[in-house]
Amino acid sequence: MTEKDDYNLMLFHFAYQTFIKTADEIIEKYGMSRQHHRFLFYISKMPGISVKELLDFLEITKQGSHRTFSKLKTEQLIEEYQANDDKRIKRLYPTQKGKNLVQILNEEQNKLLTNVFEDAGYEWFNVMERLAHKREGFRTIQAKYQLGEEKDEF
């Protein structure tokens, strides 16, 4: 592994942190975590998805989901109904309150991306650097590696 490879991994890590922290900070105000956000986002975008389908594609075990589902139902962000054709299947739907929260979260992440694209264009490396630069830790890494100026080599 080269320094360039290390730098790219760190770049991606810090860019991802910037993107997810935008929503994390909002969802935490509601006493929830990133997993709540992921569940709510996909339930909102795929109303009627079964519990099993959601857990399968998010790669989460049923045991690991109980508290998340419980909180989303308690907060009246989602509703769960038995499927008409098979009573063993539970279908998930967002409530209006859930849809509203997803809209708030999406708007903030979309604003972030819009600003980054306006500043950096759409070239992957420039976008990742722009996102990563919002993290103090990345600026330290970039100074150590001094590779940010040599991005043409990537």
Image (cartoon, grey):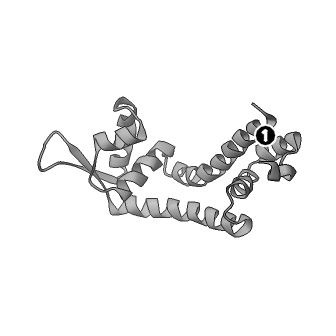
Instruction: Write the residue at 67% across / 45% down.
Output: 12
Q: Residue most toward the front?
A: 153
* Other residues around mark 1 within 10 Å, as few (<14) / some (14–19) / many (≥20): some
Instruction: Write the residue at 64% across / 46% down.
Output: 17
Q: Position of residue 117 (x, y in %)?
A: 67, 66
Instruction: Write the residue at 26% across / 54% down.
Output: 48
Q: Is residue 62 left or right of residue 147?
A: left
User: From this viewpoint, is residue 33 visible?
Assistant: no
Q: Amino acid at mark 1?
A: Lys
Q: Is residue 55 left or right of residue 131?
A: left
The quadrant of the rendering that contains the N terminus is top right
Q: Which residue is mark 1?
A: 4
Decide which of 29, 51 is in the foreground and name it: 51
- The quadrant in which residue 51 appears is top left
Decide which of 84, 37 is in the foreground and name it: 84
Compared to residue 41, the image places residue 118 above or below, namely: below
User: From this viewpoint, is residue 86 visible?
Assistant: yes
Q: Position of residue 103 (x, y in %)?
A: 46, 64
Decide which of 58, 126 is in the foreground and name it: 126
Numbered disc total: 1
Identify the secondary structure beneath mark 1: helix
Compared to residue 108, the image places residue 37 above or below, namely: above
Decide which of 12, 77 is in the foreground and name it: 12
Instruction: Write the residue at 35% across / 53% down.
Output: 43
- The quadrant in which residue 122 appears is bottom right
